[in-house]
Image (cartoon, rainbow, N blue to C red):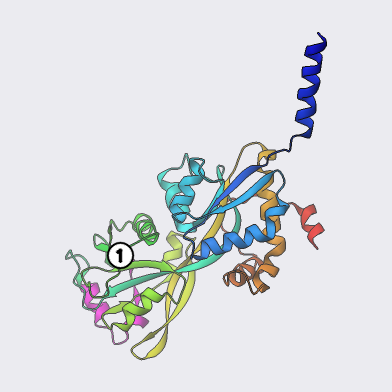
């Protein structure tokens, strides 16, 4: 009996002195040289110590789709996802991706949608041929808005995460596009391209300098009536020897995380979201952080808000940061 009591006492003492191992919050970002990974490492530097009972672990990933699917299959706890990708998967897989199961911690920077059309492109179908001819015949092509319906039934090229953005455009606007993965080749004039990235986008600049492509101007007002998450953007590129501003639409990156029904299970996400909001001004001013924090700060200061659901902020904790 004495031996058993000694064993119990020893085990209790061991448990009391053993360090508590924190669980991991794994954040999916993007490639090691990309903006997503840079933003993630900045968040880790500023906020890792403010999340209790969890170690924040920022990892490279395949980008938006990998991050979102990783959240649904327990690979990641949180990750960076473009808003069009989020809404697209919510329509395709509503049981896995919905506003109760995935919530936003913070809205991040925007990236522009670039629709590149080969000059004198011939549509694969006869529909809207007259509209194409009229568009190409305009004296100032970039000043004439492109109608997305002109792409209906066409084949478009893209690569990387932009392919999902092209698929999202096809879905939300009923375009029935055949989106094919293509290589970076400005001499392949067989199909239009959809490329999403921060402007000026170096690849787009190369295509325009070849003189073989037109950057289509997209009408935000008409596009936002169907898909309100597209924002208005103007991108500047050197076209025909002079810098021109071309209207297009943008999509915002969001930091999203897995949401649970039990409020206490979401405490770590609330802590992290609160820390980011409290530190966004310093993140924007810090010369060692990603440059996109400046646009994040502007977005938050202007009370920008996605229509997706958010993790709540801890108002008492916000006051402590002041």
Residue at the far bottom: name it: 241
Lateral position of residue 148 relative to residue 59, left or right: left
| Residue 134 sits inside the magenta stretch | yes
Disc 1 target residue? 149
- The residue positioned 28% from the left and 56% from the top of the image is 176
Horizontal and vertical percent position of residue 171: 35, 54
* Closest to the observer, 61 or 280: 61
Horizontal and vertical percent position of residue 252: 51, 63
Query: Considering only vertical position in the picture, is 123 above or below 86?
Result: below
Horizontal and vertical percent position of residue 62: 44, 55
- The residue positioned 77% from the left and 57% from the top of the image is 318
Question: Which of the image's four quarters has the N terminus?
Answer: top right
* Closest to the observer, 321 or 132: 321
* Closest to the observer, 288 or 320: 288
| Residue 139 sits inside the magenta stretch | yes
- The residue positioned 72% from the left and 46% from the top of the image is 52
Q: Which residues are magenta?
A: 130-148
Residue at the far top: name it: 1
Lateral position of residue 149 relative to residue 291, left or right: left
Q: Residues within 10 Å of mark 1 (few under 14, many from 20)?
A: some
Query: Considering only vertical position in the picture, is 82 above or below 246?
Result: above
């Amino acid at each position: 009996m004495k031996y058993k009591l000694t064993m119990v006492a020893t085990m209790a003492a061991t448990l009391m002195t053993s360090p508590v191992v924190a669980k991991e919050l794994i954040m999916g970002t993007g490639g090691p040289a990309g903006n997503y990974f840079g933003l993630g490492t900045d968040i880790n530097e500023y906020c890792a110590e403010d999340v209790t009972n969890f170690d924040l672990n920022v990892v490279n990933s395949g980008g938006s789709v990998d991050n979102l699917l990783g959240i649904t299959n327990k690979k990641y706890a949180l990750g960076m996802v473009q808003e069009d990708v989020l809404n697209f998967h919510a329509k395709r897989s509503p049981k896995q991706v919905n506003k109760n199961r995935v919530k936003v911690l913070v809205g991040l920077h925007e990236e522009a949608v670039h629709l590149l059309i080969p000059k004198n492109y011939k549509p694969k179908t006869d529909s809207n041929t007259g509209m194409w001819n009229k568009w190409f015949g305009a004296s100032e092509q970039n000043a004439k808005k492109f109608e997305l319906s002109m792409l209906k039934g066409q084949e478009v090229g893209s690569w990387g995460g932009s392919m999902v953005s092209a698929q999202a455009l096809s879905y939300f606007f009923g375009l029935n596009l055949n989106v094919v993965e293509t290589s970076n080749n400005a001499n392949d004039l067989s199909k239009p391209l959809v490329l999403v990235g921060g402007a000026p986008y170096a690849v787009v600049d190369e295509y325009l300098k070849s003189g073989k492509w037109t950057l289509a101007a997209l009408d935000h007002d008409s596009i936002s009536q169907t898909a309100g998450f597209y924002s208005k953007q103007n991108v500047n590129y050197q076209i025909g020897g002079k810098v021109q501003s071309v209207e297009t639409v943008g999509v915002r990156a969001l930091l999203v995380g897995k949401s649970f029904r039990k409020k206490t299970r979401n405490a770590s996400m609330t802590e992290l979201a609160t820390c980011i909001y409290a530190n966004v001004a310093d993140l924007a001013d810090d010369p060692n952080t990603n440059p996109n924090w400046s646009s994040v700060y502007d977005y938050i200061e202007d009370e920008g808000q996605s229509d997706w659901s958010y993790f709540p902020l801890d108002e008492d904790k916000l006051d402590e940061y002041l």
